[in-house]
Structures are given as C-alpha cells and as structure tokens.
Image (cartoon, helix red, strand yellow):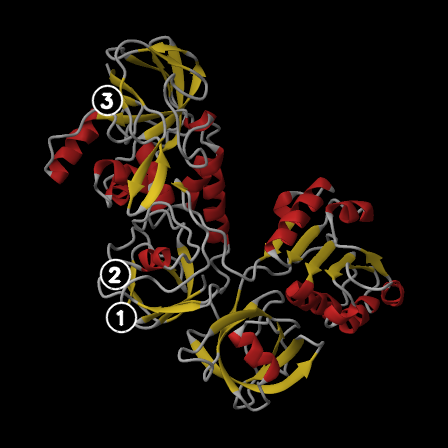
Amino acid sequence: MPTLLSVNVGMPKDVNWEGRTVHTGVWKYPVHGPAMVRRLNIDGDGQGDTAGHGGEQRAVLVYQIQSYRHWQRHFGRDDLGYGQFGENLTVDGLLDDEVCIGDRYRIGEAEFEVTQPRVTCYRVGLRLGEPELPALLVSHHRPGFYMRVVREGRIQAGDGIVQTRTGPGELSVADTDALLYLPDRDPATLRLALDIPALSPGWQGSFRELLDADEASGADNSPAWSGFRTLRVSEVTPESATVSSIHLTAPDGTRLPAAHAGQYLTLRIPGVGRTAPVRSYSLSSVPDADGYRISVKHEPHGTASSYLTTKLQPGAVLEVAAPRGDFVLAEGTAPVLLVSAGIGLTPVLAMLHELAAQGSDREIWWIHGARGPREHPLAAEAHALLTSLPHAREHLFYSGATHEERRRSHAGVGRLSKDKVTALSVPADAIAYVCGPASFMADMQAALTAAGLDPARIHTELFGALPSINPGLTGQAGRPPHQPSGPPGTGPLVTFARSGISVPFPDRGRDVLELADACDVPARWSCRTGVCHTCATPLLSGDVTYSPLPLEPPPAGEVLICCARPGTDIVLDM
C-alpha cells in the first residue's frame, strides 16, 4: 500500500536570488504529528505566488520518494530531505506514470483528487540549487502533481493511502505533463484530457489553445519576409501639427505582400544616431497596390519620431520588417467597437478602412478621445469612411477643445471615461478593439466589461513593451530600459525594439533574458529553462543558438529568450 512519509509545510519568505528578491513558499519542512488539511491549504502552509501555485485546484503538492532517489543518483547528492522539492506530501508510491488525473485518494481523515501536474517554475531549481531542474522534471517524466481537497481532515506521516476512485480518462500525470510541455502531441489525447472534469481550469485552457493552434496550423501565419528589407518612402503627408503619414513602396515597384488591418511594421532607421534606432508603428490603412502607410506622432524627445516627421523626404529608404501582430479584425457579423485615444487611432483606422472596403453591413461604433481637433489627425478621413458605411456611428470626445470646436466636430465634453462609455449603451454582443495609452486601455477594458461585453471579446494593442511576467519577484524599481552597468560587451548587437535600446551581448552573458534583466527591459518568463514558453518572443531578424536546448522548439519566427544566445545581431519585439 502507498504510504505518506512526511507532511511538509512552510510560509512564504523573501529569498535573495541573483541580486533580486523572490517571495516564495517553496521552502517546506516536515511536520511532527497530525496536520489539519483544509480546502485551500494545510495549516501552517502558504504560497508566495498564488497566480501559479495554491488555490483550490492546487491545494496540496505531492512528490514521491522514488523520484528523490532518482535525483540523488542524477545529481550525485545525499543531502535531500523531505519537502526539498516544495511538496506538501512526500509519499512512497503514487508514481507519476501510474497516478491519473481525476484519481481520488483517502489519507487519514482527508480525501483528495488529482487535478494537474506540477507547474514548471524556476523556484524549485532555486530551492535545490539546480537551475536546470524545471526542465529535467519534465524531460525525466517526474513532475509530481497537485490535488484538491475533497474532504478536510487530519493526516500524518505513516498514514496509508487508499485509492477511492479512478480518473475517468485514465490519463497519467506524466502523460498529461508531456502533453503540455513536450513536442509531437496527439490532438486526440488533448481532446481526451479536456473531457476529464477534474483537470484544473488552467490546464484545460492551455490544452484548448494547443488544439486551436493545431487546427489553425494549415494557415500560413508566418511573416511575409524574414529580417529587414529595404522599402522606399514614396510620400510624406502632414496630417496635423505633430503627426505625419509615411507611404512605403518596394524600390522596384512590385506589389508588397498583403497585411492585416491592425498589424504593425518595425522600422530600422539608418543614419539616425550611431546605432540605427528600431521602432514599431501600426499600419494606418489597408495595404494596397500603393504600398503600406504608417502615421507617426512627433514625440518631443523621440530621436526616431523626430526624424520621421520632420526630416524624412520622399525617395529615402528605410529597413522594414514584415507586418506582424495579432491585433486584427475578426470576421463575422457581430457589432464592432473601434475605441481609441490619441495616436492610438492608427490600427483601428486601418480596420475601419478594411470594413469600408468590404462594404460591411455590420454595426460599427467609432469611439475616439483627443484633446481637440488640432490633436485629432486623420479625423476627416475617418469621418468619410464612417459616412460610407450603412450602420456606423461616430462618437468623439475632446478634453481641451472650445465650445465652438466641439460643436463643429459634434464632439462630447471631457475625456473618454467609463461613465461616458456606459452612457453610450454599446451592444453587449460586440467585439471591441481598443488602442491608446496603457492606462486608457485598462479603463476601457473595465468600462466595456461593466457595459456587458465578454472580456474575451475585448482586444487591446500596446505600442510599448508588454507587461512583465516575473513570478515571485518583489520590490522591482520599474526603471525605464537602460544600458547595463559595467564595461560594454563585444558580442552581437541585441536590439529590444519595443523598448528602444540596442546593447552588445556581454562577453560572459548566459542568455538574452539575463541581458534583458540587466537592462530593465520588461520580460516575460517562468521556468527560465526552455520549458514553459512564457518567454517566447518574436525574432524580427538575426539568428540565435540555444543552451540548453528547449524541450520543444518555439514557433517559426519566435525565440525562447531564457536559453537563447545571439549568433548574429538580433532584433527582438520586446
């Protein structure tokens, strides 16, 4: 009979890690005597990062003594004590390739149900001093697993473990773990997993995304060209005192590849500064035989935007990466809300162009906020497009305009706010596309959700760097991206396009993620060993090598920055 060898608990604490502070509950220690198991926890236990650990579906983590012995042999160690893998229950038996999702077990007075494998996370490697451990747990098929508490009660070391029910899908913990993290997964097995009610909602969501990606794999979503290509400036059109539209064509006059309304171009601008700056700008119209159009706002201290809006002349050439981005208009018949502020109107204006070109009979709401008509570029163009559509509505809000300016533009008073959106009575079945400053998009998401829209139908586009995902880190200063401290490296140039900096790779650098951390470039990661793909980032140009090799390669055109080193100069969309 399987046996409970140890009950382990520990409250979260701050731990120093590579010069930063991690708040973590991975340090667990044995309990002497009975321990009370409750719905969310064992008494005396806690999790530092409840986004990835803890909660009803992950109340108790289990690891086996057989896996302890495996790692003792693998690492040549004899210092591993109960709780060292962050588990609450150290058991003899219940092997990962035998236990199935949905299995139930009685231990002492309590009963449990298996919900998911362990989440891959760098902190288990931190706890053991073995950074590669998250990847090894997956590749060696020894992740351990979480259980929810079906019945609360007391348990203690020495209790027998009795199986009370077998999971309906008979999908083992090891197989479930491999299904998410390893390549060559079987779509039929993904569907089988989704039919298991006990599987945690988080893993169900991940499997649905994998199925969706598999079903869409026939479509070619790869960039139209790799790296950067030269495009010629055919026209520069002032749209307002601070915004200019730039038209780009192929130097040989051939038609440029199609792009989706809402996508963006990344430009490398030669001749501006010692290192050519790299910036991204949304397409502001539907690409056609005349090429691409972007509309750029002159930022007071923006080197690139100053050049593009005040010095660029027709006939100049720019280096341009292929159109990218998934902030694109979905097909269908549902009402469309195009919501923007300031220069954030550019991608939704491209969507409006597309709807007009289609002669769409969808209900279309154009909702835009600006200081006034002088700060509202392309207003006449948008108004003409809306007039051509049979079911379009236009709602403008000017926060700094005179009464006469608002009267001529039929604009409302003040900033576009939650109350103003609520007063519009937008259709609850609409799909919304929102672009503007980060605070504006957050306000609009809240406003539209309050108006009855499903949050999954509210799409946003962020011009700057994506928000960080740094599980467990505390006390981060939030500094703007900067050059790293110390002497500059001599390796390939790494450009973080959204953050606007270029840095030579350090001579002793481990990976691109480490460099991003040193520059305070917002980064997204979890395992830091090439397993979870949280750090997958579009690679606009250049080549990388991997160490260690990821367990599953990223999609074409992306790179796992947590284990990638530049082989040539690279440009990353971060």
Q: Nearest to the eye among marks 3 and 2: give it.
A: 2
Give the distance between the C-alpha atoms of the residues marked 1 and 2, in whole angstroms.
9 Å
Residue at the location (34% across, 50% down)? 184
Label at residue 93: 3
Q: Is residue 382 above or below residue 100?
A: below
Secondary element type, mark 3: loop
Q: Is residue 396 above or below residue 310?
A: above
Locate residue 134, reporting x and y percent: 28, 42
Quarter of the image that includes the C terminus = bottom left
Identify the residue under disc 1: 491
Residue at the location (47% across, 69% down)? 223
Q: Is residue 316 above or below residue 287?
A: below
Quarter of the image that includes the N terminus = top left
| Amino acid carrying mark 3 in the image | Gly
Locate residue 511, reporting x and y percent: 29, 58
CB-based contact (under 8 Å), mark 1 and mark 3: no
Q: Is residue 45 above or below residue 413?
A: above
The answer to which quarter of the image holds residue 385 is bottom right
Number of other residues with Cα within 10 Å of mark 3, as a class: few under 14, some 14 to 19, many 20 or more? some
Which of the two labelled residues, at mark 1 and mark 2, occupies the earlier sequence position?
1
Q: Is residue 426 visible?
A: no
| Amino acid carrying mark 2 in the image | Gly
Which of the two labelled residues, at mark 3 and mark 2, occupies the earlier sequence position?
3
Identify the residue under disc 2: 509
Locate residue 356, reporting x and y percent: 75, 68
Secondary element type, mark 1: loop
Which of the two labelled residues, at mark 1 and mark 3, occupies the earlier sequence position?
3
Locate residue 478, reporting x and y percent: 46, 51
Number of other residues with Cα within 10 Å of mark 2, as a class: few under 14, some 14 to 19, many 20 or more? few
